[in-house]
Image (tube, rainbow, N blue to C red):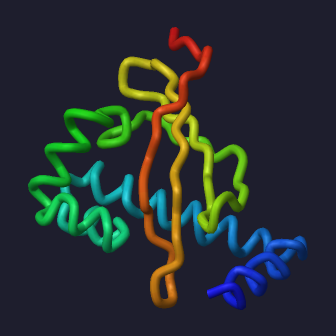
Amino acid sequence: MRLIWAILFVLASTPLAAQSLEDTIEGTISAQIDAMREGNFGAAFQYASPGIQRMFLTPENFQMMVEQGYPMVANPAAVEFTGLEMRSGAMVQNVIITDQAGRLFELEYDLIPVDDRWVINGVRILDSQMLGV
């Protein structure tokens, strides 16, 4: 496992590889959000880590959690990717979401490698000073 993180660190240290990792992370998050926008929570559930899938068991339970706890993510008006960093064995991607009412939310996505892809292992709404118009 340490070898994997060492390789990722070296790759992330080079501009081209870092861009590729950044694109991969952004692509995973974007694909999950796109699936939710389309109402396809079965597909969105596939971007969640095995631990998240075990926690919610079904796409329907996952959908209920998203709609109740993270409604801005289910159908955002806009998505902007900001900082990406490695923290405690995960890649952490900050995302600014504009909801359909124009309110801004800053979220922190944790992604972990599983097999040959990155999956979402958690999302936190950050306590930010952003105010929607």
Which of the 4 image quadrants contains residue 56? bottom left
Quarter placement of the N terminus: bottom right
Q: Where is residue 57 in the image (x, y as percent from the top left)?
A: 13, 65
Q: Nearer the viewer, residue 59 or 76?
A: 59
Q: Where is residue 46 in the image (x, y as percent from the top left)?
A: 29, 72
Q: Give left or right: position of 66 versus 4.
A: left
User: In the current view of this chain or complex, which residue is farthest to the right?
Assistant: 14
Which of the 4 image quadrants contains residue 51? bottom left
Q: Where is residue 21 in the image (x, y as percent from the top left)?
A: 69, 72
Q: Nearer the viewer, residue 76 or 105?
A: 105
Q: Where is residue 117 in the image (x, y as percent from the top left)?
A: 50, 81
Q: Give left or right: position of 110 versus 68.
A: right
Q: Look at 9% across and 56% down and name the residue there.
A: 60
Q: Look at 52% across and 64% down and name the residue there.
A: 111
Q: Give left or right: position of 14 versus 92.
A: right
Q: Look at 47% across and 58% down and name the residue there.
A: 30
Q: Give left or right: position of 98 versus 21.
A: left
In this view, 130 is above or below 50: above
Q: Look at 64% across and 61% down and name the residue there.
A: 88
In this view, 93 is above or below 104: below
In this view, 17 is above or below 84: below
Image label count: 0
